[in-house]
Image: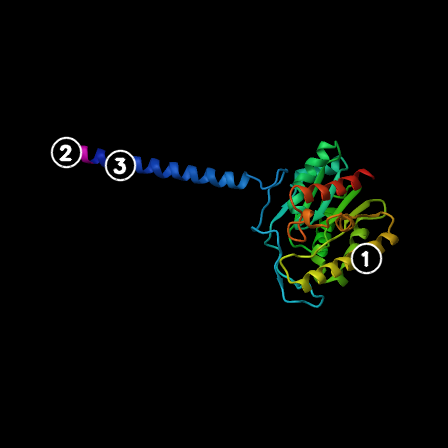
Amino acid sequence: MRQGGATEVSGVRAFFGSLLAIVVTLLVVAVLGGVFVVLEPRTTGSEALVGGTSYSVPTRGGGPYGSGTLGPWQGLLHRISSEDQIRDVLAFDGVFMFGDSIAVQDSSALEQLLADRGADPIAVHDWSGQPASAAVDALEDWSRSYGLPQRIVMAVGTNDIFDPPAFTEQVERAIRIAGPNRTVYWVNVYASRTKQPASVQDADLANSTWINQQLAQAALLHPNLRIVEWSEFLTTQPNGPAQYLRDGVHTSEPTGSSARNGLIADAIASH
């Protein structure tokens, strides 16, 4: 009886030992899988995309200006440089960039382009869906927390087509925060969302023009504000902007992304 009981206990122990080993193995695989998901960036830069699963901000209704009303954007994809990278960029007096979903998609390629050209490093605060007011808030936060380099890129304004009159104030805020001795490069906007009805596409274009007119007026008042003419590039192409935009707003890859990043890099290099 003792020998049989000992054998039975030994078998039970072996069973639970094997079960424990299986559970541990599964846990390790699960943890590693999660790490791979987190570490595998959807961009090739130093920071992976985080947040939701979409670049596109939801809109509601026709809104007062025909393009709709800006929906919640805080849960959308974003890409923000680490504190170490921000401080490294400041140490080399590189470039800060504040952008929306177009920048979220394109900024890692811009980093690589600048590196390939031997240009100064760049730190980014890009958030899908954010209007200019939120980007300027981020600019102000970085100014207080870290200080600012001599060159700042503002790649926002597309999400201000839903409320164009509010845009000028944000441009003025950005210029005040940057101060007169820094150069602010502002990428102007083009929007005509192809998945929307024709009336909304027309409103998008009209509101984009309104945004760009405000930028142009601000540049007349502030010599340190330089406009990166993305809209002019698109509208002067022989076959129109379609090959450069995948949805009437966001850049196609690689054609549109390369073209837009090239304009930004050229502007930075002209400093």
Assign the magenta stretch its main secondary structure: helix
Q: Residues within 10 Å of mark 1 (few under 14, many from 20)?
A: some
- Where 77 sits versus 210, above or below? above
Disc 3 to disc 2: CB gap under 8 Å: no
Whichever of callouts 1 and 2 sits on the residue coming sooner in the sequence is: 2
**Towards the viewer: 264 or 168:** 264
Q: Is residue 249 left or right of residue 169?
A: left
Rendering coords of residue 58 (x, y %): 61, 59
Magenta extent = 1-8
Disc 1 to disc 2: CB gap under 8 Å: no
Rendering coords of residue 242 (x, y %): 68, 50
Q: At label 3, which amino acid type do we have?
A: Phe
Q: Is residue 238 left or right of residue 24?
A: right
Helix, strand, or loop for circle 3? Answer: helix
Q: Which residue is mark 2?
A: 4
Alpha-carbon span between mark 3 and mark 2: 16 Å
Is residue 225 covered in magenta? no
Rendering coords of residue 110 (x, y %): 70, 40
Alpha-carbon span between mark 1 and mark 2: 91 Å
Q: Residues within 10 Å of mark 3 (few under 14, many from 20)?
A: few
Q: Which residue is mark 3?
A: 15
Is residue 6 covered in magenta? yes
In terms of image quadrants, where is residue 97?
top right
Q: Which residue is mark 1?
A: 213
